[in-house]
Image (tube, helix red, strand yellow):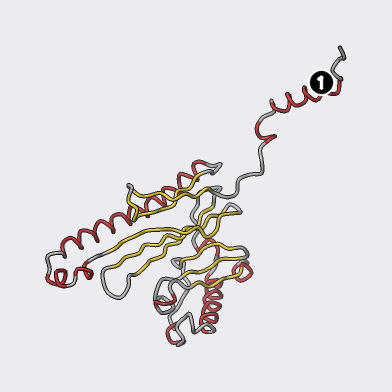
Amino acid sequence: MRSIPSMFICSIIFAFLFCLLPNHYTSAAPINSAAVTAKKYQHNSHLIYPYVSGLTNKTAEKKINAVLTKHIKKSAANYEALMQEMKNMQNKTICKDSPSACIYEYTTNYEVKYNKHNKLSLLLYDYQFTGGAHGSTTVTSYNFNLKTGQRYTLDNLFPTKKVYKKVTAYAKNYMLKKPDIFYPDSKEFSSFQITNQTQFYFADGGIYLIFQQYEVGPYVSGHPTIFIPTSLYKE
């Protein structure tokens, strides 16, 4: 019977020893994005919010989910209040004459806008309808550092008042060039300012500012956005 070649035996031994190496020698590249899944708050299909998982830093993961849970709890309170208001309306004459006028709605949903390079941007939309021609939607942006769980605000990106002024001037100029999206009259923007409360989300090469309905344009424009390149605010 022929003996097994020594090279083959060596390869088996090498493979065995390789398997015994610590994980940090064999792991893939560091995770720089998150797994984001949709969850129903208390099994309510009207209240959908994002749940973040898969982060190496579990403390950061908990911090992020705590912020998102706080938002959906507030949405749930608003939902319950509106449903109670609708219930109280049912016996009024207007509801008997026009039942559809007394059907209220409240929904929460979300959108993932950026999820790479250890940054996560989420937009949460709270929609409310209380009769009339149409409802209204409020958008809230959440931008996180996936390594630390820190929530970014514009103050983290715009370090000085000078930068805020520069970005404000850029945004005004952009809006005046797009009268089909934004208010066409420059007087509408006389007091317009980008502040730390302005909603935004990350993008490759910069950020997008996103505005509320009616804030910078008519209802039909929804939530208009303006791209701000990194070169404009990075000093």
How many labels sit on residues?
1
Question: In which quadrant will I find the N terminus?
Answer: top right
* Left or right of 141, for residue 6: right
Above/below status of 153 relative to 229: above
Residue 91 versus residue 42 in the image, above or below: below
User: Which residue is drawn at the image coordinates 21% and 67% (left, top)?
Assistant: 102
Q: Report the side of 32 relative to 197 (left or right).
A: right
Location of residue 19 with respect to 2 vertically, above or below: below
Q: Which residue sits at x=12%, y=68%? A: 92
Residue 173 appears left or right of 81: right
| Image quarter (top left, top right, bottom left or bottom right) of the C terminus | bottom right
Q: Is residue 37 left or right of residue 89?
A: right
Looking at this view, name the residue that lies furthest to the top.
1
What crowding class fits label 1: few (fewer than 14 Cα within 10 Å), some (14-19), or many (20 or more)? few
Quadrant in the rendering for residue 19: top right
Considering every residue shown, the one lying at the far front of the view is 1
Quadrant of the rendered image containing residue 232: bottom right
Q: Residue 134 appears at what percent x and percent y?
A: 32, 73
Across and down, in percent, residue 57 comes to 54, 42
Q: Amino acid at mark 1?
A: Ile
Return the x and y of residue 68 as percentages of the image width and height: 41, 52
Label 1 sits on a secondary structure element that is helix
Point 55% across, 62% down: residue = 202
Q: Which residue is mark 1?
A: 9
